[in-house]
Amino acid sequence: MKEQCELYVGSFVFLTVTPIVEREELFSRGVGEDSDIVSKEMYTFLDKSGRKLCLRPEFTSSVVRAVLNNRALDSANRVYYYGSAYRYENPQHGRYREFHQFGGEIIRCNPDSDDTEIISLCHSILRHLDLLPQSELLLNSLGNEAEMKDYRKALLSYFSKYYDSLSNESQARFDRGSVLRILDSKQPNDQTIIATSPPITSFLSSTSLRRFERLQSDLSDLSIPFRIDPRLVRGLDYYDHTVFEFATKAGAVIVLRSFEKKVIVLGRRML
């Protein structure tokens, strides 16, 4: 599959500088200490010098770190990668402790066109792999950091009314203030409560709404069908603005997140 995906990333530079073993701090700062990945899914250990290390659970943090620290990549606006990642999970269908991931990142992005470009690219790859008929494109916008802050306040108020009816995991997320991640819950009772929660689109500024509407218009012009899912969030701290996934009955096969905030967080101190 790697070779077939590579047919569609001609303008991307292959990035091979992301090691499997990383400093744990890279992900706790970049992904978020309260995320499921950091709090319970990472393989962490101490080396002989007492440094806390981990097996990489995802690629984006490593890619951003590499671009920030490597002058040779200054001119690389588009990179792609392929390799293994590791999560401490109960092995089951669609969830593995070691899995392979093919991905791409657009650095120094142009929000007016790059979201459309990457979705169109993913659409083409799925069509080539004959996975498009069983996939549905779901879209949402998380807005900017200030808009997400207002949205979190609204969700805290909303979920507080149903706290006793939430699952134990969602109650723990509420207690940590990680209310956005409650929207990721697959528990049936949680899903019933989530269904009437306020949508984030009610908290977007006119600028963020225009950006999201322009993306929808561009996709329609390209005859790429989609469905708006106002509660699609993806569970990591660094996402903002556009999120999407091509979903099947077995789960998401491709996801996209914008992460302007992540570069700021990691860029304050190059890891």
Image: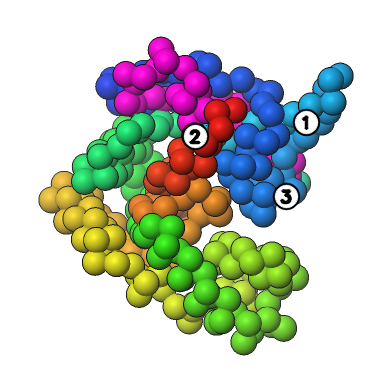
Specify whether 125 is left or right of 44: left
Q: What residue sits right under mark 3 in the picture?
A: 39
N-terminal of the two: label 3 or label 2?
A: 3
Q: What residue type is labelled 3?
A: Ser
Q: What separation in Å lies between label 2 and label 1 (alpha carbons)?
A: 21 Å
Instruction: Give the label, 2 or 1, closer to the camera.
Output: 2
59 to 220, vertically: above or below: above
At a point 37% along the width and 54% down the height, the residue shown is 241
Q: Quadrant of residue 140?
A: bottom left
Q: What residue sits right under mark 2 in the picture?
A: 267
* Residue interval drawn in magenta: 63-89
Q: Which of 82 and 270 is in front in this view?
A: 270
Can you see residue 85? yes
Instruction: Give the label, 1 or 3, closer to the camera.
Output: 1
Dots 3 and 2: beta carbons under 8 Å? no
Seen from this angle, which residue lies furthest bottom?
Answer: 161
Q: Is mark 1 on a helix, strand or loop?
A: strand
Can you see residue 138? no
Q: What residue sits right under mark 1 in the picture?
A: 52
239 to 208, vertically: above or below: above
Specify whether 168 is left or right of 180: right
